[in-house]
Amino acid sequence: MKSDEHTDTLRSRASVARIGPWDDALRLMQLAAIVESSDDAIVSKTLDGRILSWNNGATRIFGYTPEEIVGQSITVIIPPELREEEQAILRNLKAGNRIDHFDTVRLAKDGRRVPISLTISPIRDSTGNIVGASKIARDISDRKQAELLLREREDAMRDADRRKDEFLAVLAHELRNPLAPIRYALAIARLPGRSNEQERQAQQIIERQVSHMSRLLDDLLDVSRITRGTLALRKTRTELMAVLAIAIEAAQPIRRKKSRAHGRAARE
């Protein structure tokens, strides 16, 4: 009886001995499968930057196969102007520091610059010494493109606001311009002993300037329609003499004011 119990105990211990290593191997196989199926680039390297492993995600992002790049320096995929960045990363790793979600740029095999988010962790041996580094690189090209489009839209909106402000400033100036001739015409109309001709001229000035202001307001509405795409612009001929007449009429109050000022200065 004791012999049978002893035999069962030995068999149980042997079974445990067989299951333990098998479980470890299974876990390693599962981890390897996860690494190989990841869309991210997962790379390991020595502390001097030599590549030790390279998964399918790294091949997809950078274009190199493991056969082409394992054993080479990681600087193969680092732009020349960012080589110092890699030295800083290695210094941090040797100090035992982890680097999380560091946005940078790397070179693909075909020369493309690939924006990536980089996470780097030190690899330690059984005694706790740092012997290498594990890198996880995520392709963030889509995110960077979306950020670029957002910046372009923001710039376009700022530019549109600036142009709107400029237009409103010009519009305000143009709307004020007719007021001076209207005031001048009203002053003439109030003159004692004014002639019928003066009254007629004053009336014509007011009518022309009010018509000009009406056209300015119509133009403002047209600009709104243009921005909405509901109005098409057509080129037409313009009578230059009519434009000059309106400009001269608008400048008359200023000219008369300056003329009176010069006259007073000359008498003094």
Image (tube, rainbow, N blue to C red):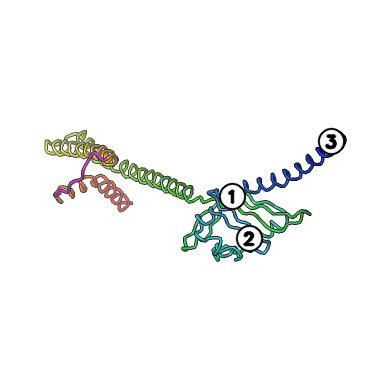
The residue range painted magenta reads 229-237
Q: Which residue is mark 3?
A: 5
- For the point 34% across and 41% down, the residue is 168
> Which of the two discs, 3 and 2, sits closer to the camera?
3
Q: Say what amino acid the circle numbered 1 marks.
A: Val
> Which of the two discs, 1 and 3, sits closer to the camera?
3
Please tell me how crowded label 1 is: few (under 14), some (14-19), or many (20+) other residues with Cα within 10 Å.
Answer: some
Q: How many marks?
A: 3
**Image check: 268 left or right of 1?**
left
Q: Which residue is mark 2?
A: 52
Disc marking residue 35: 1
* Residue 146 spot, x, y in % from top left: 45, 46
Q: Is residue 247 above or below residue 112?
A: above
- For the point 32% across and 41% down, the residue is 172
Q: Say what amino acid the circle numbered 3 marks.
A: Glu
- For the point 29% across and 41% down, the residue is 227
Q: Is residue 213 above or below residue 52?
A: above
